[in-house]
Image (tube, rainbow, N blue to C red):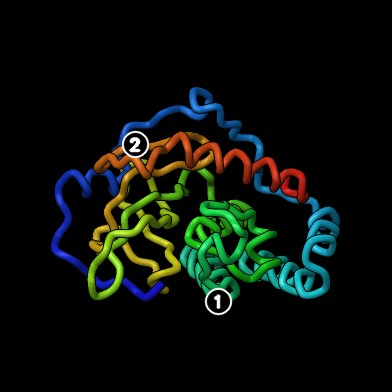
């Protein structure tokens, strides 16, 4: 996708949502199990899974991911955010799900995205979320934000997902995105209209409603991603 460019100032409703003040639906009520993906993994199982699915090329990029974790483990927060954002934006080529996976809306695990070297916005966001958790960023400070993105000269709105980092629950998030390489405060991303956000702890509803952005339908895909991650070696 081409980079997005700014639009007019967002509405107060949009500002409230991006500042993290949407309504929270607890994970238990949505059928989520927050402990499914902890901040740990089994390296040998991940290597076996990658070897089986993607061979030596996949193993090579998995080793790069291990090296990234080691290099950033003691870095300050900003370096961790920037390092992870840049790593996946460079190593995963954007491609739509039909071409990558033969499905309309497939959410890949980090291992799958790295092994194939291709993915779409959900795959970038999930991989960055999981990697930052591995680097000690608390899961409750990270949310995947489902948005409408106004893209290109025609400013056509398209479904899109970004990762948000929230210093506090009520803070304006920093946005990690594959469309725009720099990490920016949400108020500067006026090309994005948020619909809802979620992580392993729950769902935050806010902004405008749209039938194509049904949160529960997308959370069912999130559960399937978590289950596959556990099978691949994430704990």
Q: Measured from the top left, where is residue 161 in percent x and y?
A: 42, 55
Out of 189 and 185, give the one closest to the viewer: 189
**How many residues crowd mark 1 within 10 Å: few (<14), some (14–19), many (20+)?**
few
Residue 26 placement, left or right of 133:
left
Kindly give the residue lying farthest to the top in the view shown.
Answer: 29
Q: Position of residue 62 (x, y in %)?
A: 73, 67
Taking 189 as reference, is 220 left or right? right
In the rendered structure, find residue 90 and report the number of the disc placed on it.
1
- The residue lying at 15 percent from left, 47 percent from top is 12
**Residue 15 in the image, given as x and y percentages of width and height:** 21, 49
Q: Quadrant of the N terminus?
A: bottom left
Say which mark, if any, is on residue 158: none
Q: Quadrant of residue 231?
A: top right
> Tag 1's secondary structure?
helix
Q: Nearer the viewer, residue 154 or 13?
A: 154
Q: Is residue 76 visible?
A: no
Real-space Cα separation, disc 2 to disc 1, in angstroms: 31 Å
Residue drawn 45% across and 49% down?
144
Q: Secondary structure at mark 2?
A: strand
Disc 2 crowd rating (10 Å Cα; few below 14, some 14-19, many 20+) is many
Query: Which residue is tagged 2?
Result: 205
Which residue is more in the foreground, 15 or 100?
100
């Amino acid at each position: 996708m081409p980079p997005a460019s700014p639009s007019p100032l967002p509405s107060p409703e949009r500002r409230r949502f991006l500042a993290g003040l949407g309504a929270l639906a607890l994970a238990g009520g949505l059928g989520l199990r927050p402990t499914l993906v902890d901040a740990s993994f089994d390296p040998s199982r991940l290597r076996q899974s990658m070897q089986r699915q993607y061979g030596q090329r996949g193993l090579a990029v998995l080793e790069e991911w291990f090296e990234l974790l080691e290099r950033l483990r003691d870095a300050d927060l900003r370096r961790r955010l920037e390092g992870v954002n840049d790593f996946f934006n460079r190593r995963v080529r954007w491609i739509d799900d039909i071409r990558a996976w033969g499905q309309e809306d497939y959410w890949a695990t980090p291992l799958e995205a790295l092994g194939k070297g291709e993915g779409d916005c959900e795959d970038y966001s999930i991989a960055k979320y999981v990697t930052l958790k591995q680097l000690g960023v608390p899961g409750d400070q990270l949310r995947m934000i489902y948005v409408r993105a106004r893209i290109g000269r025609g400013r056509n709105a398209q479904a899109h997902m970004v990762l948000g980092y929230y210093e506090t629950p009520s803070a304006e998030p920093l946005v990690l995105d594959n469309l725009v390489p720099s990490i920016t405060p949400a108020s500067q991303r006026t090309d994005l209209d948020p619909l809802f956000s979620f992580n392993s702890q729950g769902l935050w509803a806010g902004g405008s409603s749209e039938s194509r952005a049904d949160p529960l339908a997308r959370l069912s895909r999130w559960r399937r991603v978590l289950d596959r991650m556990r099978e691949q070696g994430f704990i």
